[in-house]
Amino acid sequence: MSNRFSKTMELPPMPDEAEQRTCHPPERPSKPRPKKSKKAKPSVLGRTIAVLLTVVLVVFVGYSAFALYAIGRRQYDNSAVSTASIARYAPEDVRTYLLVGTDERGTETGRADTIMLLSISKQNKTITLTSIMRDTYVGEVNPQLVRINEAYFRGGVDLLAQTISQTYGMQIDGYVKVNFRAFVNIVDALGGVTITLSDREAEAVNLILQSEVNALMGDATTADQLSGGGTLLLNGKQALSYARIRKVGNADFERTQRQRLVLSQLLDRMKAHPFQALPAIARDVLPELTTDLSSVTLYGLSLELPHLLTSYEWQTLRLPADGTYSGFTTSGGAQVLRVDFAENLKLFQAALEQPPQFTADTIAP
């Protein structure tokens, strides 16, 4: 009897041991590894800009530190001049500073040997140097005074600034007082000034050197004498003596013209080499200056100076101008200039607001 279950069921063959050892579970599909993002390397242009910015920052910080150190060496007068309440001309885009050159020696008060205004006008982009004639009669404004230069002797820079504003009418925003030694040092720091002198002017320079300037600077009486006239490079002492000539030419009219010429030359020197003289100015000039301008104001001007020298035109002016004054003798016998102040203020205003019209002074030998 056949049994339907009698057949032996055949099982699949078992793998031998070797096969069992080499047998691996089926591999799972591997997930793709995320790619590492590569940081973009800075371009050559980017690196160059970064280096330049670093250099600019270092130079700016270094210059600022030097400028503030130098400014701190000046003699600061915290009693600032005040003319805002009496000035008739005070535009916002014009700054006018009073420059006073004195013949002070030691502790004596001295006289205002030079009275000038330096005006910076944003409106017509000019720097204007204006001489104030010392013989200007101001007795009608202040009966205690006769000539305008007496104001400094009697009441210092503040009275001088107030007298200028009361008469001519412009606002004065600060002052800088320069003594003889500072003037000499400024000229020398900038490498001298080139001036054309007549033989008579050269003789006058030599006399002034011998009589006062060489002694003031501690040099031999006959030092730095000129051999004659011509176009010459004058050092500080010679330039000071030239600016003080009184008895050659038309008295104080040509004298103030010479002063404007020297200062114009100095501006040209500063324009050509704006930073070359800074160490010498910090060492030899600033300690001799007195000003009411704050450190912040002077620092701002120092940052502005390169732009002013390269982008602004400069011009010169004299007050009173020709045709606006007449000779006058006071009851005390003083010969002075009686001035039409209103007309001179119009000329001053035109110089600072209209296109530049007053060129630099020249004096023929």
Image (cartoon, helix red, strand yellow):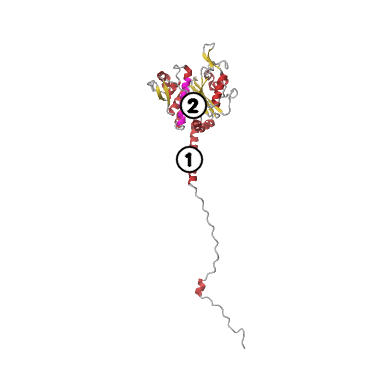
Which residue is drawn at the image coordinates 51% and 75% (left, top)? 17
Q: Position of residue 25 (x, y in %)?
A: 54, 69
The residue labelled by disc 2 is 289
Q: Secondary structure at mark 1?
A: helix
- Main SS of residues in magenta: helix
| Separation of marks 1 and 2 at Cα, in angstroms | 33 Å
Q: Is residue 262 magenta?
A: yes
The residue labelled by disc 1 is 55
Q: Magenta stretch?
A: 255-272
Q: Is residue 212 magenta?
A: no
Q: Is residue 228 left or right of residue 110?
A: left
Quarter occupied by the C terminus: top left
Residue 294 image-quadrant placement: top right
Badge nearest the viewer, 1 or 2: 1
Near mark 2 (Cα within 10 A), the count class, few <14, some 14-19 or many ≥20, is some
Using the rendered image of the protein, determine whether residue 271 is visible from the camera's viewpoint. yes
Indicate the amino acid at tag 1: Val
